[in-house]
Amino acid sequence: MTAARGANKNSGIAIFSAIFVLLVVSLLSITLHFYSRQARASAFRFQTSEVARQLAAAAIEEAFAHVLAQSEKPDGTFFRKLVDRSADIDCSTLDLSEKNQRGVEIPLELTTAQTKKMEIGSRFTISATARVIDFRNVDIAGTEYYGREGVGTLELRVVVEPASAFSHTISSACTMTRHHDYKVVAVVASRDNNSQRSGYAGSYVLDYALFLRNGQEEFASSNGTSLNPAQQRLVISQGSTDPTTFGKVFFGNKPGNHVYLNIDKERMHFIPSPHQKEFLYEPADQQIFRLLPDFFSAVRKLARPLFADIELTYGNFVMTNFAADFLFERLPVCDKDFTETDSPSGIIEIRNALRLRRWPAASDLPVSPENAGIVIEPEQNLHQILEGDVRQRFLQIASLFIELGNARIFAGSSTDTDLDSRRIEDSRLLEDFSTRKFACFDPEKFSGRQPAGIDPAYLHSQIYRDTRNPDLFSRIDVSQPYQLQAGQPLPQPVFYLKRWAGRIEDPGLAAVPFAHINLWARQRISRRQLEEFGIYNPRLKKLNLRGIINCKEPIVLGSEGDIEVTGCGVLIAPGIRIESGIKKAPGSETICVLATRGQPIVVNTDQRIEASLVSMGILDRNGHVKATRRLNLYGAMAVDRLAIDKWAANEEHHIAYDPALKRQNDLYQINIARWTTFERVVERDE
Amino acid sequence: MRNKGFTLIEIVFAMAILAVAALAMFAMNRASNQNSMDSYYEFLAFSLAREPIEVFRGFGYGNLRMIVDGNVSPPAAYKVNSMQDIEFNAFSEIQYPAEAAMFKRMIELKPVSHGKLNGISIKVTVAAKSMSRIEVWMRNRTVSLESLILERPE
């Protein structure tokens, strides 16, 4: 029984052993298979994750390129959203938890097209959004920038995730986030010609066809010749007939101080009548003798042999059949008639004297040729163009005219009777003084040398005593404002410092244009970098401006020929030389401003320059433009000093204001930095 | 009568079961091994495909465009539009795993554009060299990866 029981215990052990071994092997195999499947799944996840990441990388590049391209279009929707910081894109004021709830969809045509061609990529969906997560419209001192200007941070976010149909088989996804700084700057700030600005705008000088910051100082130090050049003619005109787009002209006077412009013959209508000679006073023969001491001396010399025994005085002479008048007329000082009269020495002195604000001690200055000086057009709109206290300067000339052709002069021992009088005949003497015109000056105000012939003391003490008419004296008229409608004062412009909201009436204290360097798109780049960044290519003769670009080296533009400029922007350099014309590209809005910080802008061409030239210094305040040839500028000019004496002589220089600079709305530029300031890649792999 | 042993039938039956099970195990092991090796080589192939994309992304659109236009030759290790063997050289600047030498790679560059937006589509195809052991293990003989490198407007 025992043996049989033992046999029963051993029965079936083989099958159990086999099953055990089988279980162990199965377990190992299953484990191996599990891990191999894991490896396989990992490889697939790696593959899908890599595809998702590559798609995200491409998509965010495309999104950035799209945003950059859109930021160039001021009339585009995205541009307006970014400038206006519309509610759907601006998250700068939201809490962190809410920032992701807004954003503008960015189209991804190229990446989407590529995705569809890819086996795995076609299983993903891609979306890109842009949002503003930070914006600062104040500078470091807390002063607000102009309008919508400011510095912000733009966030681009690309999400690559499996399409819903594949969400069960693909778990990979990728979210890529990038931050780029961007700047919004007003290249041209809107300006209503009927009012003044209420704060600092970087482009404020572009309101003016000609803006002289230190015009008053230059005018005074040059005795007025700066605005009344002797050898150059400067015509300032408008590129539009619409007064709302006129560029202003400001000569930089401080409040209470005037600057004067001469008037030429073509602008007689600026001058109050009389334009023709008008009778003022008819002197008697005795007054003639006393007014003209030389004439009287000659007469007395002739009479002395006849009356050797008496001392001849004025009372011993009588003159009849003569004509004498004090005449008065108002004339421009840039009139060739003044140099061609019968009394050239006197008139030239007057003319030279009038070139200065005060009468000169010496009168050896060169005479202005005809058609020199500054002309502002259109004349009928001068009151809409000029700002500041500009006064017209013209000559009120009074002269004594005598006609002695038929005069008869008698001398006698007594004035009581003419019985013993004897006629003095000397036709040569009468011819000398006949049809003569003697300029009359007030000796109390005219400190210079008097024109020969007339006795100013007698004129003042006797004739003026009788007439009490100040027009008896030649003088410069400085009381007429340079406008057509009398009594309408010209507006005095208002300026600002970039960090001070208060009004400044002295232009010399105003901040330079484009002073907020935080808003500059590029700073201190080299000439080589100008080319590298595609800003200026001398070989292609292209200038592409967007925003404010600061070059640290002096630049020469147009050495290879005329330049075509595109975009809207400002190029600031420590010295600019223009060798050829500058033309705006057709078909697009283009604003080109070439600026220095007081270094001269040299224009070596007479070709048309469709740009604005700004040379205003921060410390030395000596910025100016030097036109070595005839200047043909279509834009605006803003300088510290006109320095027109350095311009090409005997040329008619021309500044025509570009109406594109006078806008009813601001012209902004957006500069998005290429640099990535932050990047985060999140790969979902679960 | 009660002292029963294994009958022949029992043994044969057990061996049959065992054999079937073992065969299944062998098959499963082989599949597992195949999966593992396939995964490894596919991972390696994808890494080799990703490499030129990252390199060319670093070049940027401008330089890449010059390569596409034929104005500039690409680096020797990244010839375009031709299948190129990946060399294993312990002293070269770019180090690859030894198994990378069993792959060959083709880089294709193609300009694309949409409106004013320009880009270059880059497609990298990595394939196993013929007669290499990778051909045995990789189910997909080739893997490819594509991306875009876009121009940044000035």
Image (cartoon, coloured by chain):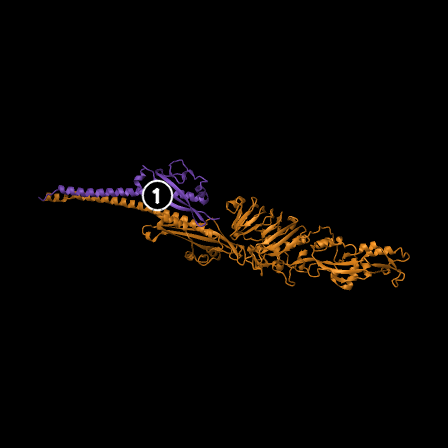
State the hue of chain B.
purple
Q: Nearer the viewer, residue A264 or B134?
A: A264
Q: Is residue A491 above or below residue B127?
A: below
Is A382 on the left-hand or right-hand side of A440?
left
**Which type of secondary structure does the marked residue at label 1 adopt?**
strand
Farthest residue to the right: give it: A309
The residue nearer to you, when weighing A258 against A338, is A338
Quadrant housing residue A431: bottom right
Picture residue at 55% right of the left edge, 49% below the top? A583
Which colour is chain A painted? orange
- Specify few, some or many for label 1: CA neighbours under 10 Å numbering under 14, 14-19, or 20 or more: some
The answer, for residue A639, to whether it is visible in the render is: no
Instruction: Indicate the quadrant containing the N terminus of chain B: top left, top right, bottom left or bottom right.
Output: top left
Three-letter amino acid code at disc 1?
Val
Q: Which residue is mark 1?
A: B143
Q: Position of residue B84 (x, y in %)?
A: 38, 38
Residue that sits furthest to the front in the current view: A406
Tell me: residue A469, above or below residue B76.
below
> Does residue A565 appear in this view?
yes
Q: Is residue B63 above or below residue A661?
A: above
Q: Position of residue A361 (x, y in %)?
A: 74, 53
Q: Chain of mark 1?
A: B
A421 relative to A388 in the view: left or right: right
In the image, A656 versus A512, the foreground residue is A656
Number of numbered discs on residues: 1
Return the x and y of residue A395 as percentages of the image width and height. 71, 57
Q: Position of residue A320 (x, y in %)?
A: 83, 61
In the image, residue A649 above or below residue B89: below
Q: Determine whether, in the image, residue A599 is placed left or right of residue A401.
A: left
